[in-house]
Image (tube, rainbow, N blue to C red):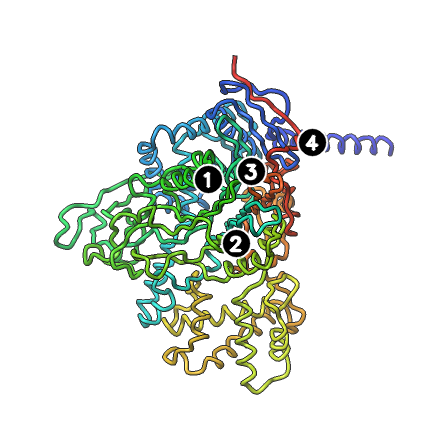
Amino acid sequence: MRRILLVVNVLIAIALVATAAVFYWVFYRALPQTSGTIRTWVTQPVQVDRDKLGVPHIKARTLDDAWFAQGYVTAEDRMWQMDTLRRAAGGDLAEIVGTVGLESDREARRMRLRRIAERIYTETPDADKSSMEAYARGVNAYIESHRGRYGFEFVVLRYDPRPWSVVDSLLVGLQMYRTLTSDWRNKLIKQHMLAGGEPDKVNFLFGFRGGGEIMPGGDAQPGSNAWAVAGTHSADGKPMLSNDMHLEFSIPGVWHMSHIEAPGLNVTGVALPGLPGILSGHNDRIAWGQTNLEYSVEDLYIENIDLRTGQYIFQGKPEQARAERDLITIKGRPAEEVANFVTQHGPIFEREGNTVMALRWTAAEPGMVRNIFPEVDRARNWDEFKQALSRFGGPPQNFVYADVDGNIGYHAAGKLPIRRNYYGDIPVSGATGDNEWDGTIPFDDLPQAYNPPSGFAVTANQNPFPVDYPYHVSGAFAPAYRSRQILDMLKAGGNKLRPEDSLRIQKDVYSEFDRFLAGQLVKAYANRTPVKGALTDAIAMLREWNGQMDKERAEPLIATLTFQHLRRAIADRASPGNGATYDTQLSHAIVERLLRERPADWFGDYDGLLVQSFADAIEEGQRLQGADPKRWKWGRYMFLVVNHPIGGRLRWVGSFFNIGPVPMSGSSTTVKQTTLRLGPSERMDASAGNWDASLLNLPVGESGHVASSHYRDEWEAYYYGQSFPMQFKNVDVKSTVTLVPMK
């Protein structure tokens, strides 16, 4: 017996040692070196301090060394994320994940993203290239020095990252551009609904996208909040600036926090892994943040060409479309050849039967895209900030601004097409001049404000273009729900606002729309003969509800399910049988407008429509959460799981890599814009001049390595609406490593 026990203990010990060895080899070896020295390709020593969240504070003696170090430390934390971003844009995912990445690769190849990135590189001025070249050298220094220990994902997928290039950085930028501007799908939905519906009603559902209209935000589109507050409204008399950008939940998160010091540069905030510079943050003089402008920079055109030859088949177009071929490498199976034609508008992007459509996109236009953020990071005042923004050619953005001299401002930026007679349809190429582009709106003509009399500059994706704007406006702008709530809460703070108050606003979950819908339901139900049971109980709850989309409440679920049934019924009225496809950004405001105006040619009995949608919603809710609505909870419907794309798929241990499942508060129409797909990707609350009073929080953590203590150390604070000091002048250093030149 003693011998058996000894053998068992020895086997257990061997298993533990083997497990520890595997853990060390696969996970621990990939963690960043945070002490001592690293010999690498810097020209002078660079000090990298890390604080308690793992944020690198880089101190370099030259700008090139600063960008080099940013590339190196970002690769230490996020190499696999960087690699997948460039692969997603370049159409190379199937090479490492097989057929599961094939459809994404096909779309990326149709969009010609790598060709666009290569062309942008040739157009980029040397001054803009230098930061990206130094950054690429830093990434490559990491790749060269870490062979065999890049991280868990590389081990599982059995490949090593290829060297990094400036084109790869441009691909990462184009991937974000693609994420923020892909509204071509909504145009296809509209086209389908027009084909089987009443044009006037379908056009109403999608809205004429002119200046000053109510243009709502929805579940599917990334959005953001940003605001600047004059010192007259703050507790310390200094301007404040806040920004929370709403993007898809992911592990690791979208952003990487960094603090970079070099001659003429002292900047901190969040960076996009793969690109040099800080995209949202502050330096020692100014702070800035951004939200998606939601201006449409894509158009589809029906092209009459022969897909065998590329020859145009109507008169007046004697030339041919240009043919391009690509080869997609697929793990585990032969490569796939893809061929396409490129027309005067762009590549053939969609094919439906005999109809082929080309995509025109500003990112593909010559001379558009520039990485301006290294220049923004060094701006000292409003004029220098605007000068940098004037060159911005990324996805159109709203920028807010604050500085230590007491100024605040707002400026839209980006290359916005000037369209002829735009009506939001998909025209036949060459048939009319509609939808054609006549250059871009001059930067000085874009919406802007400097030191507005109110002392507030608020952007939450709402339409900033005045009704009398001299250019055709095209976009899917957010409704005023979030921006009104932000402004109301800021005004309620009087002249005593602090960064903590801005954080409180960022986590607000009041929905003006759902409160309005609840009121409509209560009134409609009052005109019907009451039926005891679930319907009456639910109406009683809605009658007393304050519009808070709280995870513990039932009313948010009742309102949301009712809205979904109502939206489908309205869309089916416009285009019978197509109601399920209508889920655009416009839907909340369109539904509200119909219920307020109640045009007779849509429905004869709006109260009946509301009650029927309500009854359908209660029936659905009972299937989901039981017979008694009083026992329902919004959080059981808004049950968030954020999966690691590789580790989360592993049997038995997958949950170790993931976040959740957790119940969430908020909705697509609350300041804390939250759905099961997207939410705040960071929360920054800066105090201009009193920088160390500023706050910054990521959803998950700084590191992409599951063995790191910084893999998910920010999640709890994020979930409960707390934050961390945005360390700047006074850094609580937890570790220091020095990059030193090669001998």
Image depth: mark 1 or mark 3 in front: 3
Percent coordinates x, y for residue 538 in the rendering? 62, 75
Tags 1 and 2 in contact by the CB under 8 Å rule?
A: no
Separation of residues labelled 2 and 4 (CA atoms): 36 Å
Separation of residues labelled 1 and 2 (CA atoms): 18 Å
Of callouts 1 and 3, which one flags the residue occurring earlier in the amino acid sequence? 1
Q: Which residue is mark 1?
A: 85
Q: Residues within 10 Å of mark 4 (few under 14, many from 20)?
A: few
Q: Which residue is mark 3?
A: 257
Q: Which residue is rendered at x = 32% and y = 62% of the image?
A: 191
Q: Which residue is mark 4?
A: 20
Which is nearer the eye, 493 or 423? 493
Secondary element type, mark 1: helix
Q: Residues within 10 Å of mark 1 (few under 14, many from 20)?
A: many
Secondary element type, mark 3: strand
Amino acid tagged 1: Leu
Q: Residue extending furthest right?
A: 2
